[in-house]
Image: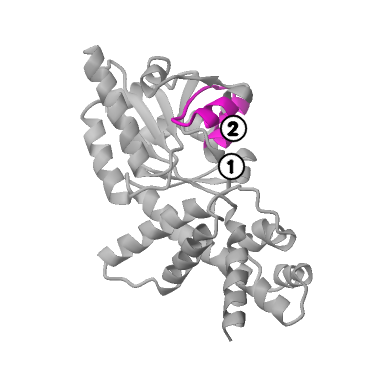
């Protein structure tokens, strides 16, 4: 692949999606010496990003006129496809066949089958797709503590090493395009259930007279310890749910897990229960809160059953 071996990323990186994750990634890139140009369909997110000292663009088309490397931190694969559509429309309108490859680094949690097919289609138009979903909250990403799960051509990933190293210090190449999304969904399944189990444990312990803070220390000092307890336990105890990741975003991931499992005739009973908890939490207005706020819904359901009895 001559285009791949000759590729050199621009000193300025385009960023599409300026939410919690996108802003955290911009900070990582800036620390590594890259300039960041951001775009988001949300005027509010764009304004906050610009007020943080970053350059903004008015469209995806204007981004690719300034850089050959885009990092995507959009909500889902639908968002990725919309970005690709805008790139293709710009190329059509400008009547230009790109002489140098364009690289898309997709940091969203997406649909494995759609991403695998998209990578093949993009390659025909001299566009490289590297899957790079991150395992970790926005705070962990900003602190360089998240892990990149990489999917795509090994040479392309090697060529983008400097940019990927800026995004995260820990990286795992799990296979071809589509495999990173599979890995992220599977690990997110375990992570999400760990959070829900911790929240349920806190509620159960409190019902028996053990204070949440005391119970958390028990968890942290026994085999029940988990990264979920380390990262989210204090938030649950203090009931402070400023979002580092959001309930509505994790429900999107869990629903994708359930859809894929159904396609393989596999039942995921714990994830089905978890998904319903999150749907109920969103109905109660907690969708924009941190995933730790799932404890609020578990308490509500306990309370509702108590009143019913």
Image point (32%, 50%), residue name: 112
Residue 28's label in the rendered image is 2
Q: How crowded is mark 1: few (under 14 residues within 10 Å), some or many (20 or more)?
A: many
Q: Can you say which quadrant of the picture contains the N terminus? A: top left
Pointer 2 with pointer 1, Cβ within 8 A: yes
Image quadrant of residue 233?
A: bottom right
Classify 244 as above or below 88.
below
Residue 23, magenta (yes or no): yes
Q: In this view, does 28 lie to the left or right of 78?
A: right
Image point (39%, 71%), residue name: 268
Q: Which of 60 and 279 is in front in this view?
A: 279
Q: What x and y, as percent, mark residue 80?
A: 35, 37
Classify 179 as above or below 118.
below
Residue 141's label in the rendered image is 1
Q: Can residue 190 be seen in this view?
A: no
Magenta residues span 22-48
């Amino acid at each position: 692949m001559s285009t791949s071996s000759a590729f050199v990323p621009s000193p300025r990186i385009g960023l599409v999606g300026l939410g919690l994750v996108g802003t955290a990634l911009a900070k990582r890139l800036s620390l590594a010496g890259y300039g960041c140009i951001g775009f988001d369909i949300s005027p509010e997110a764009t304004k906050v990003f610009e007020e943080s000292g970053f350059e903004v663009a008015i469209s995806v088309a204007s981004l690719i006129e300034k850089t050959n490397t885009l990092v995507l931190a959009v909500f889902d694969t639908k968002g990725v496809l919309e970005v690709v559509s805008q790139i293709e429309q710009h190329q059509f309108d400008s009547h230009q066949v790109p002489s140098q490859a364009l690289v898309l680094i997709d940091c969203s949690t997406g649909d494995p089958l759609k991403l695998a097919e998209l990578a093949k289609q993009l390659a025909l138009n001299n566009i490289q797709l590297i899957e790079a979903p991150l395992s970790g909250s926005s705070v962990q990403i900003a602190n360089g503590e998240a892990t990149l799960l990489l999917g795509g051509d090994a040479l392309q990933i090697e060529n983008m090493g400097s940019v990927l190293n800026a995004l995260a210090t820990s990286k795992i190449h799990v296979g071809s395009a589509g495999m990173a999304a599979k890995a992220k969904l599977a690990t997110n399944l375990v992570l999400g259930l760990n959070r829900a189990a911790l929240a349920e444990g806190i509620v159960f312990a409190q019902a028996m007279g053990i204070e949440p803070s005391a119970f958390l220390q028990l968890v942290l000092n026994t085999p029940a310890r988990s990264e979920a307890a380390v990262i989210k336990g204090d938030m649950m105890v203090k009931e402070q749910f400023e979002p580092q990741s959001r309930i509505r975003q994790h429900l999107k991931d869990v629903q994708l897990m359930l859809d894929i499992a159904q396609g393989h005739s596999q039942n995921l009973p714990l994830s089905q229960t978890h998904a319903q908890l999150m749907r109920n939490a969103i109905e109660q207005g907690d969708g924009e809160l941190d995933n730790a706020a799932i404890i609020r819904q578990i308490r509500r359901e306990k309370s509702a059953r108590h009143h019913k009895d």
